[in-house]
Amino acid sequence: MKSDKFAGIADYITQRRAQKSLSQEALAYALIDYHELFADLDSLTISRWERAKVSPNLRRQVALMEYFGDKPHTLLCDPAFELKQLPSLDAFNKMLDQQFKYNHVMGAHPYISPENISFDKLCKRADEAAQMYGWIANYHTNLSHGREQWSQNFIKSLADVDSTEVSFYLVNGLLAGHIFMVKVSQETFDQLLFGKLKDNELTPAHLIASDQPGCLYMLSTYLGGAHVSEDFVAQLLFTLVEDPQNTSFGYKARSDIGTKLMDFLGGVVVHTGEVLTERLDGAKYQGKRRSYVSFNLQRQVLIASPLFLNLIRNSK
C-alpha cells in the first residue's frame, strides 16, 4: 500500500491521478469501467472534486481508493483526513439513550448502573469462557422465548474454531455484553440469512478458515449498556473492515436495538421470521413484530458508513 498523506479527498485524487499520469478525462473513463457508481462521471466532475468545489459521496470515495490500490478504511478513519460531509454521532447516541431506558430485552442491563463506565474485556481464551458460553445459550433461549434452543456445548464447539471471533464485556463480574461471530462461505451465509439453515444447526464443518474469502455471520450478540457501546460497536465493525477477505456481514436482529443499529449502518433487510403477537417479543419491522429480521451488510457499504467512520476516528 502507498503511504502518502493526504489533507482530504481533493488532495487524494489530485496526487493519485498525477502518479498514474492520467488526465482528468482518462480517469473519468477508467472509473466508469471500474464501478457502476461512476456511470455518469465526466472530466468536469473530477475537476470540481480536485478543486474542492464539491466532494464525491462516501461510497464513491471508498471506490476511488480501491481503484487506486489503497485501503479506504485506513485513509478515511484517519482524523487528519478531512471529511466535510460526515454527520455527527448525535442521532446514534440519542437512539442508544432511548433504547437503554427500556427493559433488558431491548438492550439495558437490569443489574448494572448506567453511570458505571468501567468494564473488563475478555476473549475466548479466558478461563471464564466456558461458563459464559452457558450464559449465552441461556440468553438466546430466553430472548427467543424458547423458539430456538441452544446449549453450552453448541456454543463451545463453534468457538473452538480458529476463525470464530468472541468478546465478553464484564462489569463488576456481570456479563454486560458479548460478540460471537463466525466465518462461513457465501452459500452457508445465504442459507442462514434466509432461514434455510437454522442457527442451532450450524456445526464446525460449516465454518471456514480466517484466510479464506467469506462472510462474517453474527451468531449472537448483546449490548447491555451505554458504557460498553462505543468499544462494542467499534470492534464489531472493524472486525469486518480490517480484512478484505471478509466480503460481507450478516445478522439476525431479534430485538429492536438490533434493527436500529443496522439501520444506522446501512444494512439491507433480506428476510424476516414469523409474525409474533407479544408486544415486546422479537424485533419490530414494518409495523409488525418478527421473530427475527435478517440483514446483509456489504463491506464497502460499511466502510462508507458515517457511524463506522465517526466511531473509529473518535477513538484515535
Image (cartoon, rainbow, N blue to C red):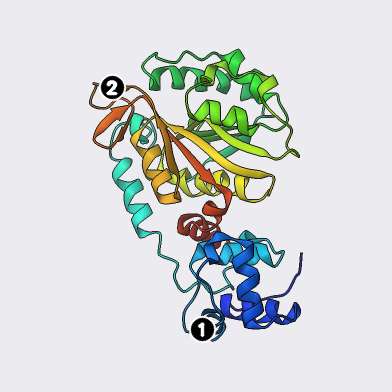
The residue under label 1 is: 48
Viewer-proximal residue among 123 and 313: 313
- The tag on residue 276 is 2
Question: Going by the image, does 289 lie left or right of 60?
Answer: left
Q: Amino acid at mark 1?
A: Arg
Instruction: Please say if 278 is above or below 54.
Output: above
Q: Please, what secondary structure does the residue beneath circle 1 have?
A: helix
Q: Position of residue 157 (x, y in %)?
A: 66, 18
The foreground one among 10 and 101 is 10
- On screen, residue 235 above or below 288: below
Name the image quarter holding the C terminus.
bottom right
Q: Is residue 1 left or right of residue 194?
A: right
Q: Is residue 250 above or below residue 263?
A: above
- 304 sits left or right of 66 in the view: left
Q: Residue at x 62, y 25 (%)?
A: 129
- Residue 215, image x, y percentages: 62, 37
From the viewer's perspective, is residue 304 above or below residue 281? below
- Provide residue 151's location: percent of width, then percent of height: 54, 13
* Disc 2 secondary structure class: strand
Image quarter hosting the N terminus? bottom right
Q: Is residue 75 visible?
A: no
| Left or right relative to 290: residue 135 | right
